[in-house]
Amino acid sequence: MKKNRKTNLFSLLVLAILCLAPAFGYSQSKIGHVNTQKVLEQMPDVKAANVQLDTINKTYQAQMKALLDEYQKQQQDLNDPTKKYPDAVLMDKQKAFKALQDRIQAFRDDANSDIQKKQDELMAPIRKKISDAISAVAKDNKADLILDSSQQGVVLYSSDNDDLTEAVMKKLGIK
């Protein structure tokens, strides 16, 4: 009975150590945070990318305006009570109007897709730069985990000592 009690006590002690061991390891971890939105807003590369995107967007807007002007013209023509078209002509005009509607929708979809693709293409190297800078700053500061404080709800509280945003901006050459 005495031996069984010692075995149970020993097992309980080993179990307690195993349960507490991870807590000791986590308590020594250093966590920091970076406001990536603030970094992005300050990067000259982002401003240059936005200029390119604005130029592309204006080109698509001009083309869309021309299509919508044609759409309005055809719609007014079809709805004009003073014009009486023979059935065959009216059906042809309605088909042309429907085709224009389809063309406008396809153009809108293609334009949005193209703009998104261009934005991804322009932002990929910028995101890589930021990621590399965050990794370097994390290593310099011996941080085990870096959170993004620009995402609402991700970082609920942190001390100013844990904010590595300025260090990342300095690493990127942003003043």
Image (spheres, helix red, strand yellow):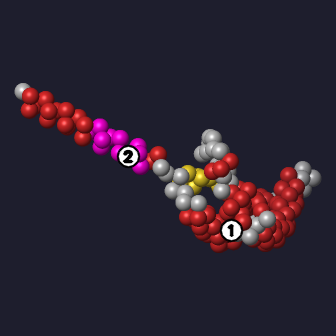
Q: Earlier in the sequence, mark 1 or mark 2?
A: 2
- In front of the other: 6 or 171: 6
Residue corresponding to mark 2: 22
Give the CA distance from mark 1 to mark 2: 33 Å
Query: Could you say which is closer to the camera, residue 114 or residue 3?
Result: 3
User: 116 and 42: which one is in front?
Assistant: 42
Quadrant of the rendered image containing residue 174: bottom right
In the rendered structure, the answer to whether residue 12 lies left or right of residue 143 reads left
Q: Is residue 18 magenta?
A: yes
Does the magenta-highlighted stretch encompass residue 66? no
In the image: residue 148, left or right of residue 1:
right
Residue 171 location, x and y as percent? 68, 68
Residue 26 position within the rendered picture, expressed as x and y whole percent measured from the top left: 45, 47
User: What type is the residue that disc 2 sits on?
Assistant: Pro
Mark 2, secondary structure of its residue:
helix
- Quadrant in which the C terminus is drawn: bottom right
| Labelled disc at residue 29 | none
Residue denoted by label 1: 171
- Determine crowd level at label 2: few under 14, some 14-19, many 20+ residues with C-alpha closer than 10 A: few
Q: What residue type is labelled 1?
A: Lys
Instruction: Name the residue at 83% across, 61% down.
Output: 68
Q: Find residue 90 and report its horizontal and vertical position in percent.
A: 79, 59
Q: In this view, does 38 lie above or below 120?
A: above
